[in-house]
Image: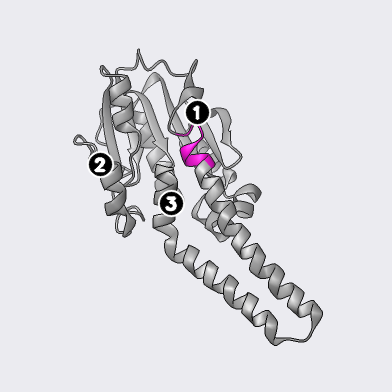
Amino acid sequence: MKITKLVILFNYQKIVLGAVVSFLLFLLSFWFNSGLLILLLRILSVLIVLNIFASLMASFILYDKSDLYELKSLKGIVDFGKVENAILIHASFDPLSKRLEKKYPNLNLTVCDIYGNRHEHEKGIKTSKKIFPANPKEIKIIPNKLPFENNSQDLILAITALHEILDHEQRVLFFKEAKRVLKNNGVIIVSEQFRDVTNFLFFNIGAFHFLSQKQWKKAISSADLRIISNQKITPFANMLILK
């Protein structure tokens, strides 16, 4: 529940607003005599509440119960015991790096926070960093200029982070940089929620926070990378494996 609690913290204003609107619609339904209008207002009131609970349930399944931060589905694709150099990219929220370092003490992991991402100045970030303190070795990066040598990295992990690169051209430049620093036999792992029907159903307009699968494919192919595998982590997120 740790990460779901943070989701609530980050979105509490929207949750409260939704609850208030739902309550007001329900109250408003008593002002009318039209049975149809009363029914519509009450249905809308209930749907708003259901959507709030649905989004929280989806967040719990994705962030606290899935393989998103466990990476078990990478078995057979990435042998962490043989990985020498790896990059982990996040957007001011890092529940993974210390877990990786503890499990693989010989892993030379560089933790990168995307500079200027939308989460940096959110009120909940201070609380999230108390629960998941920043890695002491963390560095800030500009996505279009990665501070690593050519062909130096075995693995690049970006878990629910790259959607914070808002401009398409900047995403392309990031993937070009990722390709530059990646070893010939290395892989890039990108885990993201898509702007698709499922996420619209559960997260409503919150789905606009994400990119469509088409947008990801366009940015990746424009950097001369290819998707060798597209795995569903849950109905709400995918893991793209790139080379």
Report the coloring of the rendering.
Answer: one colour
Mark nearest the camera among 2 and 1 is 2
Image: 167 above or below 75? below
Is 22 on the left-hand or right-hand side of 172?
right
Disc 2 secondary structure class: loop
How packed is label 3: few (under 14 Cα within 10 Å), some, or many (20 or more)?
some
Q: Which mark is residue 241?
A: 1
Q: Position of residue 146 (x, y in %)?
A: 29, 37
Which amino acid, mark 3? Val
Q: Which residues are magenta?
A: 61-68
Most extreme residue toward the top, as rendered? 82
Residue at figure coordinates x 22%, y 40% from the top left: 139
Which amino acid, mark 1? Ile
Asked which quadrant contains residue 80, the reply is: top left
| Residue receiving disc 2 | 133
Q: Which sits in the foreground, 219 or 137?
A: 137
CA separation, marks 1 and 3? 26 Å
Residue at figure coordinates x 56%, y 58% from the top left: 52
Q: Which sits in the foreground, 12 or 87?
A: 12
| Residue receiving disc 3 | 7
Q: Position of residue 117 (x, y in %)?
A: 34, 52
Disc 1 secondary structure class: strand
Q: Which sits in the foreground, 125 or 85?
A: 125
Is 181 on the left-hand or right-hand side of 5?
left
Q: Position of residue 50 (x, y in %)?
A: 62, 58
| Picture quarter with the N terminus | top left
How packed is label 2: few (under 14 Cα within 10 Å), some, or many (20 or more)?
some
Residue at figure coordinates x 43%, y 51% from the top left: 7
Disc 3 secondary structure class: helix
Asked which quadrant contains residue 90, the reply is: top left
